[in-house]
Image: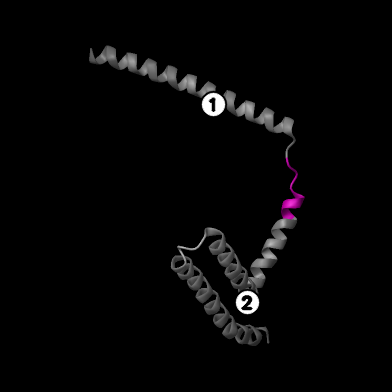
Amino acid sequence: MNVQAGAAGSRFDVLKWVVVAVLVVVAVVGNQYFAAEPILYRVLGLLAIAAVAAFVALQTAKGRAFFALLKEARGEIRKVVWPTRQETTQTTLIVVAVVLLMALLLWGLDTLLGWLVSLVVG
């Protein structure tokens, strides 16, 4: 039964996506056509068309799924335990120290190998 409901919805979803594509094309062409107008008016027009296109896109099955994904992602971000300022500073200092140590070791190895090659080559 869900397959039939999805099939019926997808027929209108294709039409909605065509409307979204037409709105995007109208926004791009309109922005070029009104290039002589002040940028504020063009930006406001683009934002208005983008809002309408987003509203139409959210009426589709994929649009609703995307919106649900955004809501779930926001919930997951709230669950993240972010490091404190002290932990971040300590970790950064450790990384900088290891990078400097490795740089010195590689510089020393490069110098040693260069000296050995110069001895062999003459």
Helix or strand or loop: what does disc 2 sit on?
loop
Q: Please, what is the three-letter code of the amino acid marked with disc 1?
A: Val
Residue that protrudes farthest toward the left in the picture:
122
Residue bearing the label numbered 2: 60
| Quadrant of the rendering where the C terminus is positioned | top left
| Magenta stretch, residue numbers | 76-82
From the viewer's side, name the closer residue of 15 and 23: 23
Q: Is residue 85 left or right of residue 39?
A: right
Residue at left 56%, top 66%? 46
User: Residue 112: x and y, percent?
Assistant: 38, 15
Tell me the quarter of the picture where residue 121 sits.
top left
Residue at left 26%, top 14%? 120
Within 10 Å of disc 2 (Cα), the crowding (few <14, some 14-19, many 20+) is some
Residue at left 67%, top 64%? 69
From the viewer's side, name the closer residue of 37 and 81: 37
Tell me the quarter of the picture where residue 75 sits.
bottom right
